[in-house]
Amino acid sequence: MSWNLDNSHATVEFSVRHLGLASVKGTFHTVTGEVDLDEEDLTRSSGRVEIDVASIDTRDERRDTHLRSADFFDAEQYPTATFESRGVRHLHDNRYEVDGDLTIRGTTRPVTLSAEVSEFITDPWGNRRFGVEVDGEINRSDFGLSWNQVLEAGRLVVGEKVRIHAASEVVLAGAVAA
């Protein structure tokens, strides 16, 4: 069955070290996605998520403008980042691993994400929905996000490891907006 991410209940967040000291966090505000779901066996499901990279928000407009530039996401030439699943493995309880292909700046790499899936419910408006939260980590240089500066003692302005956390409600296609 076909399901869609509920954009009003979806977030994609990331964190990366700044100056080797503390993590800076950011959010992408515009996220869409579809899931072909088998409610009886989630390992037979697949999905695709698309992120509008220009919707980035780190609470600093100057930094956000730099992140949209060719030094990082190059949002003008590569307006979206995508994740397309290739396989789902059940670990235990409501926990899964999702293998897929992440594409940023036209570069595609395999990524494995940890996922936690909620129960399926019928919301007050009669729509079938469930929740999913995923976590993972990537090396930003693997995707051409390589701008940096080396500071004293070899510290980098921007860390290489990027932690990703996404959460969304997913609703059966054709549902009424809540």
Image: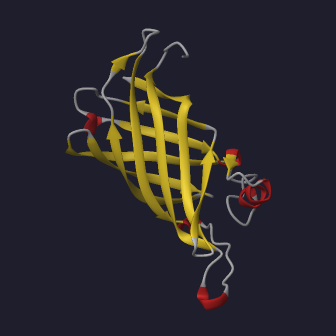
Q: Is residue 176 above or below residue 142?
A: above
Query: Which color scheme does this rendered protein use?
Result: secondary structure
Along the line of sight, the residue nearer the viewer: 88 or 86 = 88
Judged from this view, the residue extending furthest toward the front is 21
Residue 37 position, x and y percent, is 34, 29
Q: Is residue 133 above or below residue 1?
A: below
Work out whether residue 145 can be spotted. Answer: yes
Q: State which quadrant residue 94 falls in.
A: top left
Residue 7 position, x and y percent, is 57, 30
Q: Is residue 164 left or right of residue 146?
A: left
Q: Is residue 66 above or below residue 8?
A: below
Q: Quadrant of the N terminus?
A: top left
Q: Is residue 101 left or right of residue 30?
A: left
Residue visible at 68% across and 63% down in the picture: 72
Residue visible at 41% across and 51% down in the picture: 135
Work out whether residue 141 can be spotted. Answer: no
Q: State which quadrant residue 70 falls in.
A: bottom right
Q: Quadrant of the C terminus?
A: top right
Residue 109 position, x and y percent, is 47, 61
Q: Is residue 21 above or below residue 77?
A: below
Residue visible at 57% across and 75% down in the picture: 20
Q: Is residue 41 left or right of residue 15?
A: left
